[in-house]
Image (spheres, rainbow, N blue to C red):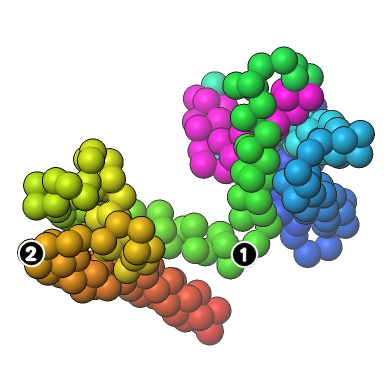
């Protein structure tokens, strides 16, 4: 029993050299993911999209159940906690969310359930498991998550403060605080759609400052991730050379 369970784990994990069954499973899952995205490119559901959804949904359910079943091998320890811990890992969450659209075709009676069709987009994230580069990037982001969180907090604080200032300085232009938040967000990201433009001199000065600060602040996450990624690549090169 244990041997068959371990073999299931070896097959559903990313294939190793010489394992034809695991390689075939990888191809099946990648094909399923891409085919499962086809309905997102169409405006309305029809008989073909329903068939695609049901077929891909069944395959994804089997994949998810198999991964939960072999979670003790994945987590590296054999206990009930291994299964619980695995269910709440990012990839397992993506796996679960990717099968929810199937509920729409089983119970197409509620508008709330209809929103589950949008969860098809999570199927793209399942591809992370089969891409070595994406795995490296995911590991890099995990290592610098504290720095990224600090930058995110800084950005949020700046957006809120900018929104408060412009909301008080341009009361005729901004009828509610959400509009001010919208303006502050597109200003700091230097998008500037132009649908909301301050009229006063002070308001325009704040807009210019916000755009300049945005160039620096928005570049921070890219710099952090790039530095960490290059560091990870250099480590792998050094390990390979040794």
Image quadrant occupied by the N terminus: top right
- The alpha-carbon separation of the residues under discs 2 and 1 comes to 50 Å
Instruction: Look at 9% across and 67% down and name the residue there.
Output: 201
Which secondary structure, mark 1? Answer: helix
List the residue tagged with mark 2: 202
What x and y, as percent, mark residue 83?
Answer: 57, 27
What x and y, as percent, mark residue 12?
Answer: 75, 44
Instruction: Look at 73% across and 24% down and name the residue there.
Output: 104
Instruction: Look at 83% across and 63% down and name the residue there.
Output: 18
Snapshot quadrant of residue 209: bottom left
Q: Main secondary structure of the magenta part?
A: helix
Front residue of 36/42: it is: 42
List the residue tagged with mark 1: 132
Whether residue 96 appears in this view of the structure is no
What segment is highlighted magenta in the picture? 81-105
Q: Residues within 10 Å of mark 1 (few under 14, many from 20)?
A: few
Whether residue 184 appears in this view of the structure is yes
What x and y, as percent, mark residue 238?
Answer: 47, 81
49 relative to 145, above or below: above
Instruction: Look at 56% across and 36% down and name the residue there.
Output: 93
Front residue of 129/201: it is: 201
Which secondary structure, mark 2? Answer: helix
Snapshot quadrant of residue 51: top right
Front residue of 41/237: it is: 41
Q: Residues within 10 Å of mark 2 (few under 14, many from 20)?
A: some
220 relative to 145, above or below: below
Tally of numbered tags:
2
159 relative to 190, above or below: above
100 magenta-colored: yes
106 magenta-colored: no
What x and y, as percent, mark residue 127?
Answer: 67, 54
Q: Is residue 221 found left or right of 103 in the rendered image?
A: left
């Amino acid at each position: 029993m244990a041997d068959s369970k371990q073999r299931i784990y070896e097959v559903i994990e990313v294939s190793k050299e010489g394992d034809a069954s695991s390689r075939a499973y990888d191809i099946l899952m990648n094909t399923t993911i891409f085919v499962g995205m086809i309905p997102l490119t169409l405006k309305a559901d029809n008989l073909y999209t329903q068939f695609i959804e049901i077929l891909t949904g069944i395959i994804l359910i089997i994949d998810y159940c198999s991964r939960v079943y072999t979670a003790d091998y994945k987590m590296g320890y054999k206990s009930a906690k291994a299964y619980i811990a695995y269910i709440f890992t990012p990839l397992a969450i993506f796996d679960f969310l990717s099968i929810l659209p199937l509920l729409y075709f089983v119970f197409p009676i509620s508008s709330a359930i209809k929103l589950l069709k949008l969860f098809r987009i999570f199927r793209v994230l399942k591809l992370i498991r089969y891409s070595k580069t994406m795995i490296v990037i995911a590991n890099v982001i995990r290592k610098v998550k504290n720095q990224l969180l600090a930058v995110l907090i800084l950005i949020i604080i700046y957006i809120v403060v900018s929104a408060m200032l412009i909301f008080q300085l341009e009361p005729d232009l901004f009828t509610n605080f959400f509009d001010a938040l919208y303006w502050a967000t597109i200003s700091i990201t230097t998008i500037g759609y132009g649908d909301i433009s301050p009229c006063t001199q002070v308001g325009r000065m704040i807009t210019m400052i916000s755009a300049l600060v945005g160039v620096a602040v928005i570049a921070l996450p890219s710099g952090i991730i790039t530095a960490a990624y290059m560091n990870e690549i250099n480590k792998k090169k050094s390990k390979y050379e040794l």
